[in-house]
Amino acid sequence: MTRETVLRERLATPDLTPELYLYPTEAGGRKGPIKLGWGCPCSKENSLQQGWDGYPLLQSEMMPGERRRLGFVFLSGAEATLALRLSDRFYLWEGGFIGEAEIIR
């Protein structure tokens, strides 16, 4: 199995599906959009005591202030999923908290 095949299979099935909300720039969010391939640490609390590298499965760029339901994959897979499911939401970190995600499934 090639690396590309493994990546395609991994990205085909999200670990979690949340409603993602990127905070507006004026509320501490990013200054620009997130794009395909972007990822960040994700934490179950709005403190970064423990985090997991997560990647939203974007079809197009997403702007600060926008909400969107989409899949997320995590480098640590099941470990992140189990930990983050202990709460109904998780938080995105990029030099500060820039968004939150309410877990739908």
Image (tube, rainbow, N blue to C red):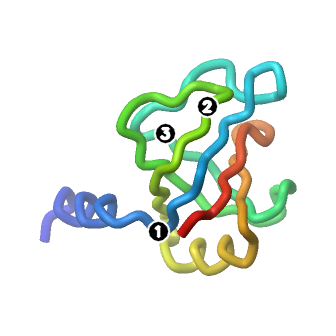
Residue 75 in picture, x, y percent from top left: 48, 64
Residues marked 1 and 2 touching at CB (< 8 Å): no
- The answer for how far apart the CA atoms under marks 3 and 2 are is 16 Å
* Residue name at image x 13 percent, y 71 percent: 1
Q: Nearer the viewer, mark 1 or mark 3?
A: 1
Is disc 2 surrounded by few (<14), some (14 to 19) or many (20+) residues within 10 Å?
few
Residue 18 in picture, x, y percent from top left: 57, 57
Comes first in the chain, label 1 or label 2: 1
Residue 93 sits above or below residue 30 on the image? below
- Mark 3, residue position: 38
| Left or right position of 30 against 104 | right
- SS assignment at label 1: loop
| Left or right position of 1 against 31 | left
| Left or right position of 71 against 68 | left
- SS assignment at label 3: loop
The amino acid type, in three-letter code, at marker 1 is Asp
Comes first in the chain, label 3 or label 2: 3
| Left or right position of 75 against 46 | left
- Mark 2, residue position: 66
Residue 9 in picture, x, y percent from top left: 24, 65
Is disc 1 surrounded by few (<14), some (14 to 19) or many (20+) residues within 10 Å?
many
- The answer for how far apart the CA atoms under marks 1 and 2 are is 22 Å
Residue 49 sits above or below residue 80 on the image? above
The amino acid type, in three-letter code, at marker 3 is Trp
